[in-house]
Image: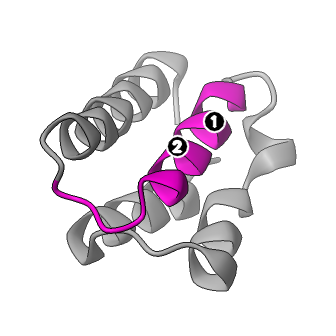
């Protein structure tokens, strides 16, 4: 995974999370805000250290839209 692809995918996910929040298409706003914080803290330089955090957090403790959940987990799994 190169930096440009990483940054592009991360921004797409942030935009999608923000879209759900702004348009009130969520049940648990707090869960979306937690995921935004995790993505905000994730950078290309620390991606390998944080790999797995998104998937673990979603599976263990968050409720987010199922399609978005899948996208977040796929992104997390693709980090290399």
Of the pair 17 and 2, the residue shown nearer to us: 17
Quarter of the image for residue 75 reads bottom left
What's drawn in magenta, residue-wise?
25-42
Q: Which residue lies furthest to the top in this view?
A: 4
Element at label 2: helix
Q: Which residue does the image show at 29% across and 62% down from the upper left?
A: 68
From the viewer's perspective, tell me whether residue 44 is left or right of residue 15.
right
In the picture, the disc for residue 47 is none
Quarter of the image for residue 60 reads bottom right
Q: Is residue 27 magenta?
A: yes
Q: Is residue 54 above or below residue 4?
A: below
Of the pair 43 and 28, the residue shown nearer to us: 28
Of the pair 13 and 78, the residue shown nearer to us: 13
Marks 2 & 1, CB-CB < 8 Å contact? yes
Q: Distance between the residues labelled 2 and 1?
A: 6 Å
Of the pair 62 and 13, the residue shown nearer to us: 62
From the viewer's perspective, tell me whether residue 35 is left or right of residue 18.
right
Q: Is residue 69 above or below residue 79?
A: below
Residue tagged 2: 33
Q: Position of residue 39 (x, y in %)?
A: 58, 36
Magenta highlight: main SS: helix
Label 1 crowding class (10 Å Cα cut-off): few <14, some 14-19, many 20+?
A: few
Q: Which residue does the image show at 53% across and 19% down from the upper left?
A: 3
Camera-side mark, 2 or 1: 2
Q: Where is residue 26 in the image (x, y as percent from the top left)?
A: 26, 60
Label 2 crowding class (10 Å Cα cut-off): few <14, some 14-19, many 20+?
A: some
Q: Which residue does the image show at 71% across and 63% down from the upper left?
A: 52
Q: Does the magenta stretch include residue 30?
A: yes
Residue tagged 1: 37
């Amino acid at each position: 995974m190169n930096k440009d692809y990483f940054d592009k995918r991360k921004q797409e996910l942030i935009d999608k999370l923000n879209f759900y929040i702004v348009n009130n298409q969520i049940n648990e706003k707090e869960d979306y805000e937690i995921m935004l914080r995790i993505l905000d803290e994730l950078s290309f330089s620390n991606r390998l250290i944080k790999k797995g955090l998104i998937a673990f957090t979603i599976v263990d403790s968050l409720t987010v839209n199922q399609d978005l959940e899948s996208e977040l987990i796929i992104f997390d799994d693709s980090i290399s």
